[in-house]
Image (cartoon, coloured by chain):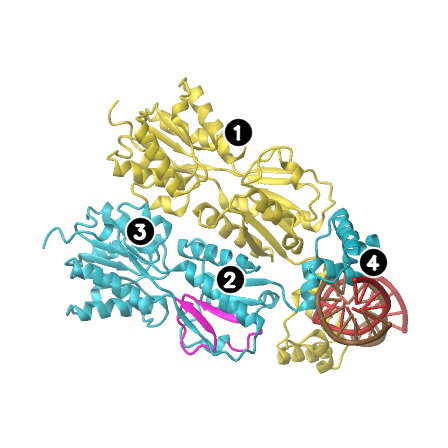
Chain colours: A cyan, B yellow, C brown, D red
DNA sequence: CTGAAAGCGCTTACAG
DNA sequence: CTGAAAGCGCTTACAG
């Protein structure tokens, strides 16, 4: 029922080519002809058929964003940033939730749906380090988001994971904490966000001459409020003594916070807490959470920019780029003051 | 570079039609022919071009989800539910953020991007009641989500807003609260979520013989943690006395909670608090927040189902449907016990 | 059971 | 400045 270019051309008494000339703002159209065309356009309420345009032009102005899960506030805020950045560039976004599942991620990268987009922003979660070969042979440009996969042939845009965790840990050490939980490692992972953050945590300890204690390193996977809360229950049950907590994501910090306070621990008096991500909620928790702002808007902006460049010129010969956003330690009440009991 | 049906047909030594027969599972293909085709398919790594398929078939298996803002946890969780429901039906989702802006919403409903989808799930925010005529004349089926726009020619799926607010308010009244804030009205709005929730609040008061007090009805728009926190600052500054708070969304409740606790008010001892939405965060706030679970998964599932029916048969003649999800009052610590000081 | 051909609605050389 | 025509990669009647 929708009007086509054909219909408009008939109404205006011109050829299809003239109509597209008007629509696409080609300058050399006689004013009189232009008027006839715009009238017909308005009259028929013409809306271009993007599918047809895409088939012909080979681009859809659609990009895919593959993330583990929108329920995780970090990814919801990231998706928001990405969509704003994409819109500013005239792109729409298809969001695909992988659930952190490796097979699903691969299917989403290579499946027909991806084929429909011009490019992919991929926040890897199920696919692990050293698997970058899976990214080869894809027909669409890919930009990696927020993870660090080694040896990739693709651009990636991420935060300074190790440096952020280092700053968070050092912040607690400077306030006299010595028994600091490394909260949210992924079992055995040395790359990826979790692995890099663990590295930064260990480096800060080493620099301060504090021997790392394996009982203070807590594996948590995946990162949700409830997994953070449950992990803290296990820590408390184990009787491990600690006076600081560096969480590798805000949501697990918030889950742990809840468990600690229910158990009668005072934050920050008994335990200084630092999170990671600076999600909106950290400003309103009890107490407000010190955290690392990863520069989400910057990450989204640069990633979309990179992807657009790759889309426009897939064979530019520009080697894979690795962009690191600037991060910031945001100090709030959960970490301020020194220990209550030396 | 991607292989086409043509390429596969050439490789297999058959016609295009035979290849599609195999791909689309048409039963009557000779096993031998089928084998040749599947071999060629694998060899060339054939992935169908969805754009071409769409142009021909007239459907894209893409639906748009128009919501105000993914930063709002309610909408992030709703988007998650919708995407899961859509995926179960073989549909992908383009998320469009309207920012609650009326013009943007209209553009998103009628623009070429919407034209590219098979249908639209629309969580109205900028467009207000009595404007349902804007939904006429759209070329794609629309299902309204979570708002109640009168006289619409479209299906809508929503929660029982008034009943939920009624239950929340009654819950506080039963626990001895009499000065209950109606927190989060939209100025002058009587329809939409805010308006309906206000109605339910007022009805509960009326039933309990409590005269409504205009100074207890607090306008907040839009609903964010920070607008909730700021509104509570104004309430405290005004000196209004209250012992209960029914918030029309969780995020404004959580913002207000933070302000109250900073001001030395005890929750629930001094103020009993009930929120609305049952976002994950309410389980982990200090104290955990009593709230109304709106049945988000049910809403998403039914909405996608309705939309799919409309897509499959746009002229079924089935009159517009109005589905109300079942809701539940989830009691947590923020509202338990009776007032500390009668 | 399989093939040849039309056509979805655009854009893009190519003419004039 | 404007037109006629090809073709993007599929699906869908229509033949045989």
Residue A254's disc is 3
Give the SS element for disc 3: helix
Q: As drawn, is B214 to the left or to the right of A253?
A: right
* Residue B24 visible in image: no
Instruction: Specify whether disc 2 shares its chain with disc 3.
Output: yes
Measure the C-alpha gap from mark 2 to mark 3. 26 Å
* Residue A116 visible in image: yes
Residue A299 or residue B225, whichever sits in front: A299
Residue A14's disc is 4
Q: Nearer the viewer, mark 1 or mark 4?
A: 4
Return the chain for callout 2: A
Q: Residue at x 26, y 55 (%)?
A: A232
Q: As drawn, is A287 to the left or to the right of A94?
A: left
Give the SS element for disc 4: loop
Q: Residue A23, position in %: x, y?
A: 71, 58
Residue B30 or residue A87, whichever sits in front: A87
Q: How crowded is mark 1: few (under 14 residues within 10 Å), some or many (20 or more)?
A: some
Q: What stretch is highlighted in magenta?
A: A136-158
Q: Do the residues labelled 1 and 4 touch (CB within 8 Å)?
A: no
Q: Is residue A253 magenta?
A: no
Q: Name the residue under label 1.
A: B190
Measure the C-alpha gap from mark 3 to mark 4. 65 Å
Answer above or below: position of B166 versus B52. above
């Amino acid at each position: 029922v929708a009007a086509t270019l054909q219909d408009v051309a008939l109404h205006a008494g011109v050829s299809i080519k003239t109509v597209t000339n008007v629509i696409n703002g080609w300058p050399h159209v006689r004013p009189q002809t232009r008027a006839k065309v715009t009238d017909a356009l308005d009259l028929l309420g013409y809306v271009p058929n993007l599918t047809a345009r895409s088939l012909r032009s080979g681009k859809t102005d659609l990009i895919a964003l593959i993330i583990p899960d929108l329920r995780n506030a970090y990814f919801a805020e990231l998706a928001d940033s990405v969509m704003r950045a994409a819109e500013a560039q005239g792109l729409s976004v298809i969001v695909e939730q992988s659930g952190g599942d490796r097979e699903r991620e691969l299917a989403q990268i290579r499946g027909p749906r991806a084929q429909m987009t011009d490019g992919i922003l991929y926040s890897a979660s199920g696919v692990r380090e050293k698997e970058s070969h899976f990214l080869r042979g894809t027909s669409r440009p890919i930009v990696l988001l927020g993870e660090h996969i080694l040896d990739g042939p693709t651009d990636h845009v991420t935060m300074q994971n190790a440096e952020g965790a280092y700053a968070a840990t050092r912040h607690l050490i400077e306030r006299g904490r010595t028994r600091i939980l490394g909260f949210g490692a992924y079992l055995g992972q040395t790359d990826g966000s979790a692995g890099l953050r663990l590295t930064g945590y260990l480096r800060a300890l080493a620099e301060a001459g504090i021997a790392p204690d394996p009982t203070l390193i807590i594996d948590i996977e995946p990162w949700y409020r409830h997994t953070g809360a449950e992990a803290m229950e296990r820590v408390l049950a184990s009787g491990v003594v600690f006076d600081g907590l560096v969480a590798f994501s805000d949501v697990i910090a918030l889950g742990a916070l809840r468990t600690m306070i229910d158990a009668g621990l005072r934050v920050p008096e008994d335990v200084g807490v630092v999170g990671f991500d600076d999600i909106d909620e950290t400003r309103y928790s009890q107490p407000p959470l010190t955290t690392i702002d990863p520069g989400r808007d910057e990450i989204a902006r640069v990633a979309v920019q990179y992807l657009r460049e790759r889309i426009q010129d897939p064979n530019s010969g520009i080697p894979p780029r690795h962009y690191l956003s600037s991060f910031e330690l945001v100090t709030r009440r959960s970490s301020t003051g020194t220990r209550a009991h030396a």
